[in-house]
Image: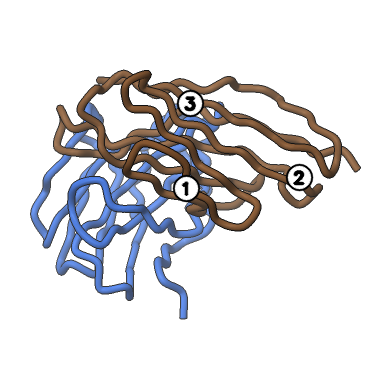
Amino acid sequence: QKEVEQNSGPLSVPEGAIASLNCTYSDRGSQSFFWYRQYSGKSPELIMSIYSNGDKEDGRFTAQLNKASQYVSLLIRDSQPSDSATYLCAVNEVTSYDKVIFGPGTSLSVIP
Amino acid sequence: DTAVSQTPKYLVTQMGNDKSIKCEQNLGHDTMYWYKQDSKKFLKIMFSYNNKELIINETVPNRFSPKSPDKAHLNLHINSLELGDSAVYFCASSQDWGGSPLHFGNGTRLTVT
C-alpha cells in the first residue's frame, strides 16, 4: 500500500499565529487530496479538498498542493484555541481502486 | 437530518461474541465505506461498496463481513470478537467512486473484554 506521511506533532502555536501542517504521499498518480479535522472523541470532518497544483483558500484555511514534490500542506491563519484538534491528510490511491487513505494525523494545540 | 448515521454509538461485549454495526446515509451517495481507527488514532479503510457492489476488501479477517442491502445502507457484522477488535469503527459515504470527499458517521466505539 502506498503511504501518506505527516508529522505526528504535537504542534503548538500561540493564538493568532499561523499553523503550518505538512503531508507527503507516495502515489505519484494521486489526484485528490483532502484535509480533515478530528476533535477528540469525534468523527473526522472535511476542511478542504484540493485537486490542482497551487493554493486554495477558504476563510482562514489555505491548502497548498505540489504534485511534482508530492506534498500537500494546510495553513491555518489567525489560529484559535478552537482549532486545537488532530488534522488528517488523505489522498486517493490510484494504484488501488482509488481508495482514500489517511496519514497518521498531526495534533495541533493552539495556546491562548 | 443526520447525513451518515451509525448505531450503536458504544458497544461493549465479551470475546467470542458476534455483533453488528448498522450504517445509513441520506445524502444520496453511491459509495459507502467502513474505516477502523485504532488506539493510535490511525484511520484505515476496511471495506467499500459502490451501488451495493463490494469494491474494496482490505486485508481484514474474514470474521468481518459487510452487507449492503441497498446503496443507502452498509452494515458490518463481526463474528467471534477478539480483544484486538477493540477500536472505533467509522462508516462513511461519498458522492461517487474515485477520490470524492468522505462524509463520516459519528463512529461506534467497540470494546471487547
Nearest the camera: B71 or A33? A33
Tell me the shade of chain B: blue
Label 3, residues with CA under 10 Å away: few <14, some 14-19, many ≥20: many
Q: Residue at x 25, y 46 (%)?
A: B99
Image position, residue A108 (x, y; %): 70, 34
Q: Chain of mark 1?
A: A
Nearest the camera: B69 or B41? B41
Q: Residue at x 36, y 53 (%)?
A: B102
Element marked by disc 2: loop
Label 2, residues with CA under 10 Å away: few <14, some 14-19, many ≥20: many
Looking at the rendered structure, the kind of residue marked 1 is Lys
Element marked by disc 3: strand
Estimate the spatial distance between the alpha carbons at disc 2 and disc 1, rounded to whole Å.
18 Å
Q: What chain is the brown one?
A: A
Q: Residue furthest right?
A: A112
Label 1, residues with CA under 10 Å away: few <14, some 14-19, many ≥20: some
Q: Are marks 3 and 2 in contact (CB under 8 Å)?
A: no
Relative placement, left or right, of B100 versus B12 is left
Residue identifier under label 3? A23
Residue identifier under label 1? A56
Q: Chain of mark 3?
A: A
